[in-house]
Image: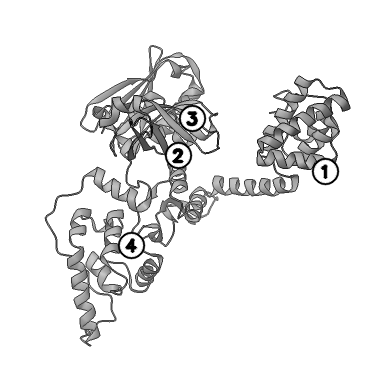
Amino acid sequence: KRKKGLTKINYEHPLLEEVCADTYGVMIYQEQVMAAASKLAGYSLGQADLLRRAMGKKDRQKMAKERANFIQGCKGTNKIAEKKANAIFDLLEKFAGYGFNKSHSAAYGLISYQTAYLKANYPVEFMAGLLSNEIDNTEKISVFVGECKRMGIPILPPDVNRSGLKFTPESGTSVQSAEPGSASSETYATSIRYGLAAIKNVGQAAMEAAIREREHMGEFTSLEDFCRRLDSRVANRKMLESLVKAGAFDFLERERAELFACIDESLAAASASHRDRACGQVALFADMPAPASKSASRQVPAWTRHDAMSYEKELLGFYVTGHPLDAYAAVIAAGNYQTIASLGELADRATFRIAGAIVQVDRKFTKKEGKPFAVIFVEDLTGTLELVVWNDVYAKISDALVPGKVIAVRGGLDKRDEAIRATAQKVKVLPADAANSLTSGSPIAIDSNGGAVILRFCPSATSAELRDVRQILATSPGSAIVQLIFERANGEVLRVDAGAELRVQPTPELKQRLARWLAA
């Protein structure tokens, strides 16, 4: 905006114009911090470099000493008042905390343009590479998966017949070329498939062997076929349990619980086949792909949706086929909660409001008085937050602090040591009757009626899409109320008022921005 003349360029002191003219008054490079100290306070380049180091390391003792030197230097060199010198030092300190030297910044700037180009033009391939690069970092994986959802990129569960070792782009439908007279078509990647090596308890070597077998002899046709075609030292019970729980055999269109119950029988049948082969009892057509084999069926209760998703979370690091919060999307959207990932942008001691599912509860007692309190871990679609629930709050909500419970939290941040710590000031359980109003997907209808904007959400809307809609509504403030109507799968309707903060001006531009959600 400063470059285009939309925002006026202001300098704390005229001498800073010479230092920051190339960057439109914004201090970006470490060299600028050093030059400012030299010109304003008479520092030598050596002294300016020591100042830069102290600022970069955030050494409070050295910073206090340098502040006094800087103020004295400004007064003696350029007759700058103490108040103004303090303001300039604060400015230098702020930028020195994240600034790099100019050559380093140029290199990172180039990389930023390259990655921005890849993300804009090859989003699926870019995100697949990003996920694969952090395959062992569950926390980052969760953040990147949230970004994929925001971008509309589906993350597909692992599949022993489709997955590679790492996250891989998966092609969608074929698209006809736009070139005049061209009959060619291209197939674009539209989703990302979870990699087999990223599943806990399976091992990379075992999955490499499975992929080689699949590429050489064709797709696996059953759980028993998978066991039979792999070496008995590779296919073991623990590995198969993890694959089944993670959904890697969902292509068989059988309940995961049933497949799980058939693991021992499949291993036994495969073991018998391996023994026959070792004894020389080889079939006449042994070199040909085996006919489709099917594990014996078992009459066992299907896993609940909660159990199935919990297994996914345990083995994959995040939920793939759904999220516990999807059922609460309407309530969360209406509550205008912040995401956990966004808390890092808040200042120290800032208050926040989040909604999430409890994933872990550690109950403890204070050392002095022995009062009970808890440390809980709450997760939303963007990340996980550790929260301390002290006794005054704990006493009111202790019975509800159990894994799987969806709660809303008002709390305060403590960022004194850079790590984010949070304390719960108020905790409430989100109403259970809000569940199941939404699951996944999302056509939205928009209508205006008597100055009101009415958004109708099908039973398949996701919380990520609701956040996108909210951001669009926020760009057109006005006096018209916004009502959210959520249609449940059973035909029931839930009506929610978006509140005074989201009143809008229902302009044609607003409707156009919401066009991609309009029902056909």
Q: Which residue is mark 2?
A: 150
What residue type is disc 4 on? Val
Q: What percent of the width, then of the height, locates residue 499?
A: 40, 17
Alpha-carbon span between mark 1 and mark 4: 61 Å
User: Going from the N terminus, do you reach mark 2 or mark 3 first?
Assistant: 2
CB-based contact (under 8 Å), mark 2 and mark 3:
no
Seen from the viewer's position, the closer of residues 124 and 19 is 19
Regarding mark 1 in the picture, which secondary structure is present there? helix
Regarding mark 4 in the picture, which secondary structure is present there? loop
Which label number is shown at residue 46? Answer: 1
CB-based contact (under 8 Å), mark 2 and mark 4:
no
Outermost left residue: 299
Seen from the viewer's position, the closer of residues 87 and 128 is 87
* Residue for point 17% across, 67% down: 265
What residue type is disc 2 on? Arg
The residue carrying pointer 1 sits among few (fewer than 14), some (14 to 19) or many (20 or more) residues within 10 Å by Cα, namely few
Q: Which residue is mark 4?
A: 160
One can see residue 158 in this view: yes
Alpha-carbon span between mark 2 and mark 1: 48 Å
* Residue for point 30% across, 63% down: 239
Regarding mark 2 in the picture, which secondary structure is present there? helix
Q: Is residue 115 above or below residue 420?
A: below
Q: Which residue is mark 3?
A: 413
